[in-house]
Image (spheres, rainbow, N blue to C red):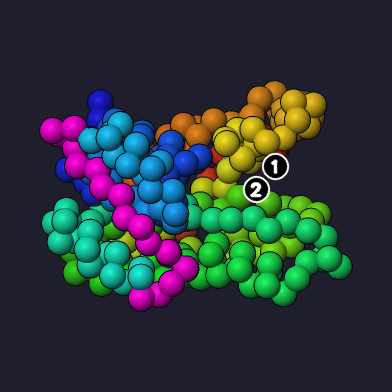
Amino acid sequence: MKLLIGKTAIITGASRGIGRGIAKIFVENGCAVAFTYNSNKEAADNLVAELSSEEVKVKGYKSNAANYNEAQKLVEEVLVDFGSLDILVNNAGITKDNLLMRMSEEDFDQVIEINLKSIFNMTKAIQRTFLKQRHGSLIHMSSVVGVKGNAGQSNYAASKAGMIGFSKSVALELGSRNIRSNVIAPGFIETEMTDKLSEDVVQGWRDGIPLKRGGQPEDVANACVFLASDLSSYITGQVLHVDGGMLT
C-alpha cells in the first residue's frame, strides 16, 4: 500500500545519504518530490533520472536553505512546478567537528546557520501555503547527538538540539490549523560519510548499539513516511528516535 499518493514534498539536501534515501522511499510511496542540493549537480541529475516516472514527478533545485531569500524563492518555484505542497523534510546539514578549545567561531557559526537557521528559513517560506490549505507535515532531521550531546560536536549538538525546541514551538503555534511538526533523531546511520571511517571504528559503534547494527538510510526514510502520511495525523510535537536503541 502506497501511503503518500497525491502528496508533494520538499526534501532539503537529498542528493546523497539520508536525504537520498528519503526521496527514494517517498517516490516508492507515490509522493511527488522536489529536492535541493548544494553543489553536486551530477548526483542530483542521477537521482532525478533514477526516480522519475510517468506516475511521479521528481525535480532537483540548486538552493541553499541557509539563505532566507533562496528558501522563499525555492518554495515559490516548487509551487509553480508542482501545483501543491504537503510535506517539508528539513534534512540539509553539515558537521565541523572539533573540541571546543580548538573550534573556530566560523565553524560554530556555519554549522548553526546551515543546520538550524535553514529550518527557520524553510518553515517560514512554506508556512503561508500550509496555513492557507489548513494542512501540512513538517519533519525536521535532528540527531541522537542533539539529545545526549557528544564530545567534539558542541556546534552540531547545539544545532540539532535547537531543532527540537523549534519544532515543539511550531507544533504549538500551528496545531490548530492541522499543521504538524515533528523531529526524527537518527543514531549511527551508515552512509557515504561513515564509509570514510575504518571498519574497526564502525564495528565499535555497532557493538554499542542494542540492535547490534548501524542504521540504513531507509530506516530513517521509513520513519519519515510515517510522519508524512495520514497514519500519523494525531502526532505532533514529538521526537522519534531512530537509533537502534542507543538512548534506551
Identify the residue at the far front of this view: 42
Q: Which residue is mark 2?
A: 144
Q: Position of residue 41 (x, y in %)?
A: 38, 48
Q: Position of residue 83 (x, y in %)?
A: 13, 56
Helix, strand or loop status at disc 2: helix
Q: Which residue is mark 1?
A: 247
Q: The C terminus is located in which quarter?
A: top right
Report if residue 39 is visible in the image.
Answer: yes
Specify the segment rendered in magenta: 53-69
Q: CA distance from mark 1 to mark 2?
A: 8 Å
The residue sitting at 58% across, 43% down in the picture is 186
**Side of 201 where 44 appears, left or right:** left
Q: Is residue 72 magenta?
A: no
The residue sitting at 68% across, 58% down in the picture is 96
Q: Is residue 56 magenta?
A: yes
Q: Position of residue 130 (x, y in %)?
A: 25, 64
What residue type is disc 1 on?
A: Leu
